[in-house]
Image (cartoon, rainbow, N blue to C red):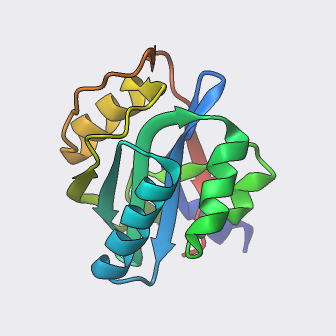
């Protein structure tokens, strides 16, 4: 049993951007139109500048590189109604998978794939993580958007190796 647990691993990226966080949502089991509707609603309600939607075998990941306090990010995760990130509240940051899932020495699931980006031109963030945007652009082809944010984070990011459920 321990060997099986140690075998099932993935690499994820933390929501931390210095003292602030980017928004990360894990929406398993939802079809794309449902995810787009939730993303659009959250963008309008919380004045977010954009949302990137990535597809996974089980559903979708949604990320926004506007930076915010951890409390605001948790609040948005809770109000989305569909996010599966509640386990991250105890850690003090969210983690989304950026690698494939591995087990028994082989890839069990492919990495997420970029589907599209939703932009709200009128919403101007105070902070923005250029570092997260750069990683997602390099790994998934997410477009690098210009930002008018006054605070830009371009520092180190935390990568996390963790055990997966399957």
Image location of residue 25, percent across then percent down: 51, 59
Q: How many marks?
A: 0
Q: In the image, is 166 to the left or to the right of 93? A: left
Q: In the image, is 138 to the left or to the right of 132? A: left
Residue visible at 56% across and 40% down in the picture = 15
**Location of residue 60 with respect to 122 vertically, above or below:** below
Front residue (pair 3, 51): 51
Q: Quadrant of the C terminus?
A: bottom right
Residue visible at 44% across and 62% down in the picture = 102
Front residue (pair 119, 109): 119
Extreme residue toward the front, this view = 122
Image location of residue 56, percent across then percent down: 34, 69
Q: Quadrant of the N terminus?
A: bottom right
Image location of residue 2, percent across then percent down: 73, 67
Q: Is residue 111 visible?
A: no
Front residue (pair 144, 87): 144
Extreme residue toward the right, this view = 90
Q: In the image, is 22 to the left or to the right of 53? A: right
Residue visible at 24% across and 47% down in the picture = 140
């Amino acid at each position: 049993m321990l060997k099986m647990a140690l075998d099932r691993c993935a690499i994820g990226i933390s929501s931390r951007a210095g003292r602030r966080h980017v928004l990360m949502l894990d929406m398993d089991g939802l079809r794309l139109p449902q995810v787009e509707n939730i993303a659009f609603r959250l963008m309008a309600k919380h004045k977010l500048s954009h949302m990137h939607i990535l597809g996974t075998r089980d559903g979708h990941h949604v990320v926004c590189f506007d930076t915010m306090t951890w409390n605001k990010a948790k609040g948005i995760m809770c109000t989305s109604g569909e996010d599966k990130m509640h386990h991250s509240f105890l850690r003090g940051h969210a983690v989304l998978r950026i690698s494939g899932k591995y087990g028994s020495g082989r890839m069990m699931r492919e990495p997420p794939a970029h589907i599209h980006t939703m932009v709200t031109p009128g919403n101007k963030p105070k902070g923005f993580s250029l570092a997260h945007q750069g990683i997602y652009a390099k790994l998934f082809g997410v477009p690098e958007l210009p930002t008018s944010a006054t605070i830009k984070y371009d520092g180190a990011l935390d990568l996390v190796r963790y055990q997966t459920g399957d």
